[in-house]
Amino acid sequence: MKHKGQILLITVMLLATVMTIVLSASFKSVTETQVTKLEEENQKALAVAESAIEVALKENSSNSSVTSVAVSSISGITGFGGSAIIESLANNTFVTPNIAKDGSYTFYLGAYDVTAKTIGASLAQAITVCFESGTPNPAIEVTLVKTSGVKKYVVDPSTSQSGRIAGVPNGLPVSTSCPSGYSYSINIPGLDTTGVGADSKFMLVRVLFAPTRLLFYRATTLPVQGRTISSNVTSSTSIGVSKKVVLFQSYPQIPGEFFSTAF
Amino acid sequence: MRRVFVSLFISLFVYFFISSFVASVQAICYCRTNCRANEELVDTCPGYASRYCCTITAPTATPKPAPTSSTGCNCNIPQPGDCTGATCVATTQCGTEGISCNTQDNATTTKYCNGLQCGATGRCAYSPTCGGTSQCKPGTAGCTITQVNGGCGGGTCSACYTQTGTISCTGLGHCSDTCVFDASCGTSCGPAPTNNPGPGSAPTCVDWQSITINSCTLAGFQSNPIGSNCYTPNQSVTLHLSSNAPTYMGFANVPLATACSAVPDTSFLPLEAYSTTKSWTLAAGTGTKKVCVGYVKGLLTAKCQARIIVGVAPTATPTPTATPPPTTPTPIQGPWTKLKNTSFISKNSLTSSIPLVPVSYDLDDDGSTNFIINSELIVGRPSTAGVAGAPAINITGVNIAAKTSSPNEYKVAGYSPSYLMAPDSFLSYIKARKQHTAITHSDLSEITGSGIYVYQNANPQLPPDPLDIGISNSTVFNDKNLVLISQGTINISSDFNPTGSVAIVADQIIFGNTVAQARGIFIANDITTGSTANQGLKIVGNLIAQNSLTNSRKWSNTNIPSLFIVFDQQKYINLLPYLSTANYDWRQIQ
């Protein structure tokens, strides 16, 4: 009798052990399935957010009064809510993406009319162009384009070194308008005879020797340099995944290779 | 014994059961912005930017600290309180470094600028003491710049500077001024402003003829060996000046490698009344010395150079009469090129032998010995001629005084640029991203308005036939702003002067021999200008040949440039929507 009781107890314990293993495995499987679903919905939400940006860009290009697109209005997309909003963010500083060696950036000095494709009048106000250091240091050539002509400004921090642009400003001391991370600068005066005037249209900054970001600064708000589209999408399922994607699309950029004479 | 076995078994069971359960619970990954107190940050959450995979902390495990910046401060998206006890180094991080008030970082939470709490507007507040530009920074709250047309020495500007603006801090008043150097601020800075005397009477500077050191002339310094009169035993020399009756002159000793055009105006101070001779002391030491002279006449200036060697002239080695000494062949003047108001950056070496006495191509050409003409000649004003950069630059084969540009010579030899955009890649971009019209008719009748046109074969799989643009079809370009692209050859067989702005992008562009002038932006891998005996080619717009330029144009007078390229910025302004790409910056915020 004593033996029977012990066998029963051991049997119950073995059963409990097996059940524990089975339940643990089952629990883990369910969890992994949930994570997989979450990941799938996550990818879908990202794709929808990007689609909304594409649609917003397209509609705004054909009709500039369209400044937002509801996700629900996009055909073929269900199960998601949210919108893509087109903004024109203005500030008194503007930072470009990293510009490759020999690349360029077209910086607008007047308001760009996307529909009429024209550039408005500029303020006769000084603009500071800041750029970074590097190994080797980058140098920049600023071409100020006006309806009446062009003006050129060249800065090379390594001007005194062999193989660099001799006899030009070295960009020092860096302007106090340049935040940390920017080691060199040039000030384009706000006088029509020597710099930015009312007929100024844009500046094309060519980056030489090494890549750098550029920062433009003006005491007053700079003209808008492009469209910022913010897309915020949320899935309508119980998981409720949200995605927010922001895209900045610059106004037309003239390739630097097509701006400088070459042969 | 059996009881001991049973007890041991029960103990093992309990331990196994509990540990299995805990392990399974621990494996759950919670994607959170911040892990909770009883959770452990394991990794970033897959698919979620700025979220972390958090698991419940095992009771016996040592808690793993969250990723931190230098102080152990929470580096997650900042929330009020996240940065308690630490200062921010960026809008999304914390750290120990203070921020200078020079920065313009947004101050969203706890943020200090070298002990000053950030201003309410989200920018660094200006210092309560108004005394330096860093303390009253344009763009910061309370700091304003007012443009003024102040006179010489106005405000806090020094005597030779004109006040162009005032900087003020709210509540603190006037801080400082913005000043620019102005040569018209008196005789100590330069002459008083006068009316522009006109190009005819502007001071002229013909190198070597306008300044001579002692009796060292152009021919003397250029001769081989250098003439003995181009040596001086000491630093005291007499300068002989010759110019077109300027009002003032000034001098500067400069290093040999420094172009006089690049010498700042202030280096010529003080100016003195013009005379034909001047006693001068050269820079210390022996060797070749260079002196620059700056002539001022009204608002116009000219800077000229001269050289002389401080030392003893070498004694000539007797040459055997039987063997004549080798002579340097006289350079033969060939076709050469001149640019105006542009930059030159090329992968190919630049070779253009500028003659000793150039002759103007037309009224757009100033007849100078510069490769790139600068149309802005007033002192203190920026140049319109830009950088000349190439693997090698040789423009002094005939005239050693030739420059890439003047007065500022932005020259960089030994530079090998890379082309990030080429005709082929631009066409690919246009086809993928821009609205354009494909045309197939060689009469160009499909061009109906401004825009981008891609000329292609009727069968797009085949390369396009050469396209001829001549008298019969060039009128379609009038009154339109357009870019015409072809993957083949475009022949321009007659003068091309459309009333609109046109850019032609092709694999190859060939100008016919009879073309004297073409207005437009011509971009190709290879460009041929034709072959003539007495006819040059003028381009008004721009010319970019990324692989090669074959220029067989000639004038009977070889002192005239055979190819003259005048940059026209208006074409770029008009073609901005078409001859352009776009820049994208994509960020996933959540």
Image (cartoon, coloured by chain):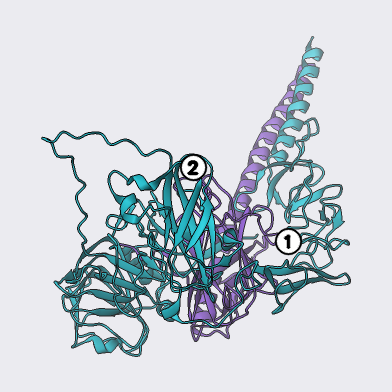
Chain represented in cyan: B
Name the chain under label 1.
Answer: B
Amino acid at circle 1:
Gln
Q: CA distance from mark 1 to mark 2?
A: 56 Å
Q: Residue pushed farthest left?
A: B322
- Residue A22 appears in the picture as rendered: yes
Amino acid at circle 2:
Asn
Q: Nearer the viewer, residue B262 or A45?
A: B262
Query: Residue B27 is drawn in which quadrant?
Result: top right
Q: Secondary structure at mark 1?
A: loop
Q: Position of residue B556 (x, y in %)?
A: 17, 71
The label shown at residue B234 is 2
In the image, is B332 to the left or to the right of B419? left
The label shown at residue B104 is 1
State the hue of chain A: purple
Instruction: Give whichever of discs 1 and 2 has the lower sequence position.
Output: 1
Q: Secondary structure at mark 2?
A: loop
In the image, is B74 to the left or to the right of A200? right
The residue depicted at 10 percent of the width and 35 percent of the height is B322
The mark lying in front, picked from 1 and 2, is 2
The residue depicted at 27 percent of the width and 45 percent of the height is B224
The residue depicted at 81 percent of the width and 14 percent of the height is B3
Q: Position of residue B199 (x, y in %)?
A: 43, 79
Q: Nearer the viewer, residue B220 or B414?
A: B220
Q: Residue pushed farthest top?
A: B1
Name the chain under label 2.
Answer: B
